[in-house]
Image (cartoon, grey):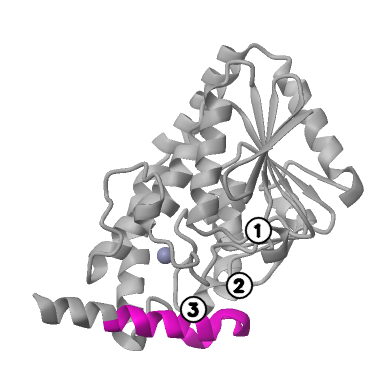
Amino acid sequence: MTQENFATGQVRYETPAPHVARIVMARPEAHNAQGLQMTYELNAAFDRAAQDEEIKVIILAGDGRNFSAGHDLSGDGGKTWRDFPVVGTWTDFDAKGAEGRYGREMEIYLEMCERWRNLPKPTIAEVQGKCIAGGLMLAWVCDLIMASEDATFKDPVIDFGMPGVEFFMHPWELGIRKGKEFLFTADELTAAEARACGMVNHVVPRDRLSAETLALAEKIAKKPLFALKTTKAAVNHVQDVQGRRNAQMHVFSLHQMMHTHNQLVWGMPMDPNGLPATVRDKVIARAARAREAEAKKSAAE
Ligand code: ZN
């Protein structure tokens, strides 16, 4: 097996078996929380696997106890979008008003997820422990989901005054009624419940998760690559003609409207009352700095 870390080591690239790439979020101390750094490293890793003609199947995994705690709300250590290789064309992530956030979330959440979902080669998420909010987006972009018995899934953003995470797959993944309950209550879904809804393909013991995921990847990797690619494109297309993309774009507008509403009411894009205590102070302080910067910008104009 070969393995390689990208520049800052938040993502590791492995080739654990012939024709299989394994992309690993390697930030277990932060429960693989996803900031800009990890997002662009993941994108580079997916690109690399997509462009390597030897690779046929891609696994997405996370080091440590939990698959993903979701988006990193604590910031990017002073770095801005200008420090990263932006892929789309919305840009201007720090423009004032709703403009900057719209462009930023379009690029790093919505279109990045669409891009990864639409990778031609089959992908498998290997999920253990907690998979929260933005973490769901990472599992959902994959074609198949393997979960360990201890895996749990949760989207708590209604508590922050938001209607679900940006990549809005809840109704497709869970069905309409369960999807609504999942969003309304912000309750945790166990791996067994997620499997019963059809969201998870297989549930296996924690100590067998990587081996079982690799075995599934190797089984798929025996099939002809172009047939795999066209089969995946066919199934994705069926979901898209059912209205997935149209619904997604409408929901994205609602999502942005709620960020703007929260900004007007609370002075920040989320209702701070529902934020986890571990990040609340940081988020409030960052919002205050952002308001100050925007006021300065407006005064200078
Ligand atoms: Zn958002």
Q: Is residue 281 above or below residue 164?
A: below
The amino acid type, in three-letter code, at marker 3 is: Phe
Asked where in the image residue 60 lies, by quadrant, the reply is top right
Q: Nearer the viewer, residue 39 or 115?
A: 39
Q: Nearer the viewer, residue 257 or 282?
A: 282
Give the alpha-carbon distance from disc 3 to disc 1, as whole Å.
21 Å
Q: Position of residue 114 (x, y in %)?
A: 44, 42
State yes or no: discs 2 and 1 in contact (Cβ < 8 Å).
no
State yes or no: discs 3 and 2 in contact (Cβ < 8 Å).
no
Q: Which residues are magenta?
A: 272-292
Q: Is residue 50 above or below residue 195?
A: above
**At numbered mark 2, what does the secondary structure look like: helix, strand or loop?**
loop
Give the alpha-carbon distance from disc 2 to disc 1, as whole Å.
21 Å
Instruction: Mark 2 vs mark 1: give the one in front.
Output: 1
The amino acid type, in three-letter code, at marker 2 is: Ala
Closer to the chain start, of discs 2 and 1, is 1
Give the alpha-carbon distance from disc 3 to disc 2, as whole Å.
11 Å
The amino acid type, in three-letter code, at marker 1 is: Asn
Work out which residue is located at the far front of the displayed protein and give it.
7
Q: Which mark is residue 186?
A: 2
**At numbered mark 3, what does the secondary structure look like: helix, strand or loop?**
helix
- Indicate left or right for 175 with 252 as reference: right
Residue at 52% from the left image edge and 72% from the top image edge: 74
Dot 2, crowdedness within 10 Å: few (<14), some or many (≥20)?
some
Q: Position of residue 185 (x, y in %)?
A: 60, 75
